[in-house]
Amino acid sequence: MTSRRDFLKHAGMAAGALTLASMLPPAIAEAMEKANNKIAHLSASEAASDEDFWNYIRESYTISPNIINLNNGGVAPQPKIVQDAHERYLRMCNEGPSYFMWQILDQGREPLRTKLAQQAGCSSDEISICRNSTESLNTVIFGLNLKAGDEVVLTHQDYPNMKNAYLQREMRDGIKLVWVDLTLPNEDENDLVKTYVKAFTEKTKVVHITHMINWTGQIIPVKAIAKEAHKRGIEVVVDGAHTFAHFDFKIPDLDADYFGTSLHKWMGAPFGSGLLYIKKDKIENIWPLLGNGKPKDTDIRKFESLGTRSFPAEMAIATALEFHQAIGDKRKEERLRYLKNYWMDKAANIPGVKLNTSNKAQFSCAIASFSIDGIKTEDVASTLFSKYKIHTVAIVLDNIPKGVRVTPNVYTSLRDLDKLVLAIGEIAKTAGTSGSK
């Protein structure tokens, strides 16, 4: 077992403070550097198909030999080094909880905040560390100064936890919710923007935009919608649960006033970790979701009055962040899109298969959805797992194209996707004889 002295050294701790100089163990960092050097001459799009590099990345995960996990959209696994960091911090805390949690690990929040802000492309004074997208966005939704009659524009395709938060404010405060429907998939940016803008009135105070519709992987042109909203004095709340660390962008690029995401999805951080971004000049006007002694303060930290939290999970975010950065934002984006296009292009040629996601880079990345004519969505997903041990998720909701959502990740192999396509083809052949409707 690693001694505490070695652990502190590897974790970048000095004088009781977490410096985050480098969270990757030296051997891992060296191996990653060698792997990167081998493809340094390739562009991000060229590197997307370098299977030697991505096989190395695959080996960095603890992948089950019994199933093919293609539901990374729900929650993603952590690289082994992130699991190891989490476990080390957990063991450390249990040797003296109040000391190691509050006097050691708690001192790492500010360096971590700085690292996350660098990744997000904003000031560290605009980043709050939380547990997931629901917590971050509910903080904003319930913290907005809205009164009876104020209008909020949102869509039926937004995530239920966010819709329910607005519905609760409607019941409690009398705000008016203006619902719009998105046509999915959609490859017309102007049409998507107009869908939101047509719902704006003089009473509209907020527009809620889901950056990527989690059910089908549709990317929404947030910046263009935000531009139109701000022309009218409307604030912009963005649900980025599925976009941060998924494809290459910086939060300020979106021109959002508020942005929430989960780090346990595409960042591969420990389960129950997230991030909230609020523009500096907006912080004062948002009430904290949890009680704080200075609710009107301009300090982003007022949103972190959680009390005892999972310090080990929080501090292991840094290791996940370094692993992500070692791969590279653009390189990761190109690989994820390459994997999605790889299976979609093959599945498109199977009779009876319908794709619910665009293949254009502007409108999609890793997440995609398909259906098979004549077979219930639930039956397709069930057969994929029972017969082929391929784990996906069936999407059967109102206002959403019914289909099986497929979400690969950086550790997914082409061999896995070949098995998926083979399975889809075999299931589709049964459509005429299954009797399913």
Image (spheres, rainbow, N blue to C red):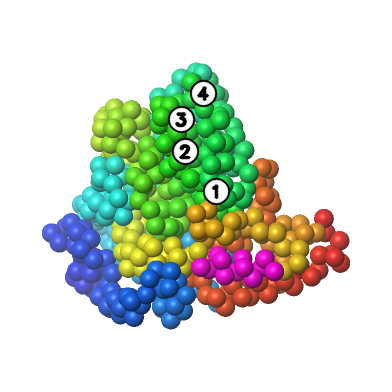
Residue 152 magenta: no
Q: Is residue 31 above or below residue 273?
A: below
The mark closer to the camera, 3 or 2, is: 2
Q: Is residue 216 visible?
A: yes
Of marks 1 and 2, which one's residue comes earlier in the chain?
Answer: 1
**Three-letter code for the amino acid on which mark 1 is drawn:** Ile
Q: Which residue is mark 4?
A: 201
Q: Which secondary structure lies at badge 2?
A: helix
Q: Earlier in the sequence, mark 1 or mark 4?
A: 4
Judging by the rendered image, the residue that carries numbered circle 2 is 225
> Is residue 34 placed above or below 259 in the rendered structure?
below
Q: What is the span of residues highlighted in magenta in the rendered image?
A: 338-349
Depicted 396 relative to depicted 11: above or below = above
Q: CA distance from mark 1 to mark 3?
A: 19 Å
Contact, mark 1 vs mark 2 (Cβ under 8 Å): no
Residue 404 in the figure: left or right of residue 91: right
Dot 3: within a 10 Å radius of its alpha carbon, few (fewer than 14), some, or many (20 or more) residues?
A: many
Give the number of the disc on residue 213: 1
- Going from N to C along the chain, the mark reached first, 3 or 2, is 3
Give the distance between the C-alpha atoms of the residues marked 1 and 2, in whole angstroms.
15 Å
Mark 3 near mark 2, Cβ–Cβ under 8 Å? no
Circle nearer the viewer, 1 or 4 = 4
Residue bearing mark 3: 206
**Total tally of numbered discs in the picture:** 4
Most extreme residue toward the top is 148
Q: Amino acid at mark 2?
A: Ile
Q: Could you tell me if residue 72 is visible in this image?
A: no
Q: Are marks 4 and 3 in contact (CB under 8 Å)?
A: no
Tell me how far mark 4 sits from mark 3, CA to CA: 11 Å
Q: Determine the residue positioned at 55% across, 76% down.
A: 414
User: Which is nearer the N-term, disc 1 or disc 3?
Assistant: 3
